[in-house]
Image (cartoon, helix red, strand yellow):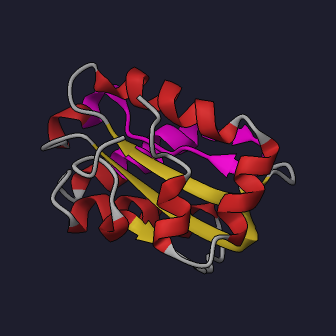
Amino acid sequence: MNGDVLNENTVLLNARAEDKEEAIRMAGGLLVDQGYADATYIDKMMEREASHTTYIGNSVAIPHGTEEGKEHIHRSGISIVQLPEGVDFGDGQIAKIVIGIAGKGDEHMDMLSKIALVVSEEENVTQMVKAASKEELLAMFQGVN
């Protein structure tokens, strides 16, 4: 994935969140702060979570906005929040990596499939949770096209 979509400015290490709402707002906030979306997109991420969990297993959640939220996306971007202590996404599903997605147009599904290639391997997720630097975490996604 190229640096326009995912870079060290959209990665937060060693974060702590009281609940999944706070974790989603962190991931969305990184996207907003870097100009990928406007602040309303975070509300659309929360709406999506309220209707269907974005926890995908393997200690990973991938929050993203509703279909209506796409109008609040300026360009495609990905954020990653590392939560070593984890946060409960419901029913005891603990996310230690929260990956926020803002996909412009039809890029959403392509972004999800590229992320899935990395996070489907448990050892990759473990490495992401233990990453001591943003560069180390970002290296997991290099070469994923």
Q: Is residue 66 left or right of residue 33?
A: right
> Can residue 29 be seen?
no
* Residue sitting farthest toward the right: 92
Q: Left or right? Give the position of 40 relative to 1.
A: left
Judged from this view, the residue extending furthest toward the front is 143
The residue under the point 27% across, 19% down is 106
Tell which of 86 and 82 is nearer to you.
82
Q: Is residue 72 above or below residue 135?
A: above
Quadrant including the N terminus: top left
State the residue at coordinates (85%, 48%). 91
Segment tinted magenta in the rendering: 43-69
- Work out which quarter of the rendered image holds the C terminus and state it: top left
Residue 47 is one of the magenta-drawn residues: yes
Q: Is residue 136 left or right of residue 36?
A: right
Q: Position of residue 112 (x, y in %)?
A: 48, 30
Answer above or below: position of 19 versus 128: below
Q: Position of residue 74 (x, y in %)?
A: 12, 44
Residue 95, x across and y down, in percent: 71, 57
